[in-house]
């Protein structure tokens, strides 16, 4: 089964939190961020994929889009114009996010070290079950994103072929799709390969935010369970109970360290994503008014793919805030009555630490949550309203 969790790991054959990133790491290798050695199986595939992504996605696609706008803008119909406008925004967003992550990639290695340290504090059978569930959830998220994004590419190519054109009308001096059936198919293949590079980049830059926050939520849940079990075993001495509390404090500090390491990366990339998504949703909403039935279906699917770039992560961040609030409440209602003074003093200090919830912001300004995503969707409808009020539809049609 594709989602079956492998019980082999780099450390002693045990399930580790880092295993949650396996499918995500495969996608990273395909865009050249973590290339395997030449002794590894299928190393050549990842090298070919990297060359394709950089050459076709990062170089040819932006160049082709610019040249298309320069040379053929006057020939565009309204349908072609709105389809064209969406592509530069999306490709520029993907490349910008990729550059940000590439220059901050060392933080990911440090986060992986923190993951291993958190695993060392969670060695019980229930803890292993929670980590196993986290691994499955993260792999499912990666696969779902791959299906959505490549589903859009398939629908865009099929829709373009139905209209006897290429999806994005990329500039190509050697291929003229209108000349012959052979050049028509070759043009679609070239644009599909170029778009594949951007899609792979979007998968990596959009999935990592959800995967890393899901891992964070899993370890917060493990910490809540550990706090609930404090002083619940009558056979344990006060020293043993105190040691358990100290482990809880250490686990919470690792969670804070984990969040502090990944926060700058998420803050910058999500800000770019929110701006891009608002613009693309606005363009998609307006473009639907001009498209025929086939292009409308493609645009609706495209809008769903756009929303999938932000809504799941916004929802996950909202759930993370709830988890942090629950953590503070569970700590308050833990079995501390009758404990020794040393235990109570440490618990009070721990309570102060948990009062500040773990949260993420876009560019350090806007707190990420469901409210952020709703405001972004409202912006898209505002664009639609402006177009209607100014009668731009009639002007465009003329």
Image: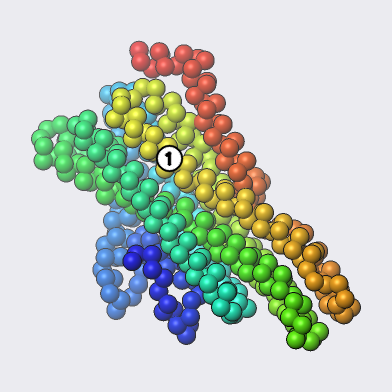
Location of residue 172 in the rendering, given as x and y in whole percent from the top left corner: 22, 40
206 with respect to 218 (left or right): left
The quadrant the C terminus occupies is: top left
**Location of residue 362 with respect to 224 vertically, above or below:** above
Residue 109 seen in the current view: no
Residue at (36, 22) in percent of width and height: 290
**Location of residue 16 with respect to 392 vertically, above or below:** below
Residue at (39, 22) in percent of width and height: 289
Location of residue 338 in the rendering, given as x and y in whole percent from the top left corner: 87, 76
- The image quarter in which residue 30 lies: bottom left
**Location of residue 287 with respect to 371 vertically, above or below:** above
Residue position for label 1: 304
How many other residues sit within 10 Å of disc 1, few (<14), some (14-19) or many (≥20)? Answer: some
Nearer to the camera, 93 or 112 = 112
40 with respect to 374 (left or right): left
Residue at (25, 35) in percent of width and height: 160
């Amino acid at each position: 089964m594709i989602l079956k969790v492998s019980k082999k790991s780099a450390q002693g054959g045990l399930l580790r939190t880092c295993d949650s990133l396996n499918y995500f790491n495969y996608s990273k290798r395909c865009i050249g961020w973590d290339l395997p050695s030449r002794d590894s199986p299928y190393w050549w595939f990842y090298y070919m994929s990297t060359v394709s992504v950089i050459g076709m996605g990062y170089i040819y696609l932006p160049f082709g889009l610019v040249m298309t706008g320069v040379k053929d803008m006057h020939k565009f119909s309204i349908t072609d114009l709105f389809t064209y406008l969406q592509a530069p925004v999306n490709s520029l967003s993907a490349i910008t996010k990729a550059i940000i992550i590439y220059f901050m990639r060392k933080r990911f290695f440090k986060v992986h070290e923190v993951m291993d340290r958190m695993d060392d504090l969670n060695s019980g059978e229930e803890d292993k079950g929670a980590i196993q569930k986290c691994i499955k959830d993260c792999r499912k998220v990666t696969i779902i994103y791959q299906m959505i994004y490549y589903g859009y590419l398939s629908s865009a190519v099929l829709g373009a072929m139905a209209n006897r054109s290429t999806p994005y009308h990329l500039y190509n001096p050697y291929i003229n799709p209108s000349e012959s059936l052979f050049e028509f198919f070759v043009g679609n293949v070239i644009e599909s390969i170029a778009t594949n590079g951007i899609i792979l980049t979007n998968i990596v830059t959009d999935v990592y935010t959800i995967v890393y926050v899901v891992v964070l939520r899993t370890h917060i849940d493990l910490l809540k369970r550990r706090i609930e079990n404090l002083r619940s075993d009558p056979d344990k001495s006060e020293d043993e109970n105190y040691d358990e509390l100290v482990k809880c404090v250490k686990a919470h500090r690792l969670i804070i360290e984990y969040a502090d390491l990944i926060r700058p990366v998420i803050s910058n990339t999500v800000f770019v994503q929110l701006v891009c998504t608002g613009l693309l949703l606005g363009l998609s909403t307006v473009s639907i008014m001009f498209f025929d039935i086939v292009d409308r279906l493609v645009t609706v699917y495209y809008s769903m793919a756009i929303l999938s770039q932000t809504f799941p992560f916004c929802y996950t961040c909202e759930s993370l805030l709830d988890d942090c609030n629950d953590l503070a409440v569970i700590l308050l209602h833990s079995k501390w009555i009758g404990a020794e003074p040393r235990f109570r003093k440490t618990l009070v200090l721990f309570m102060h630490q948990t009062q500040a919830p773990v949260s993420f912001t876009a560019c350090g300004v806007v707190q990420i949550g469901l409210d952020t995503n709703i405001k972004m969707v409202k912006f898209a409808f505002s664009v639609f309203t402006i177009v209607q009020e100014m009668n731009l539809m009639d002007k465009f049609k003329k």
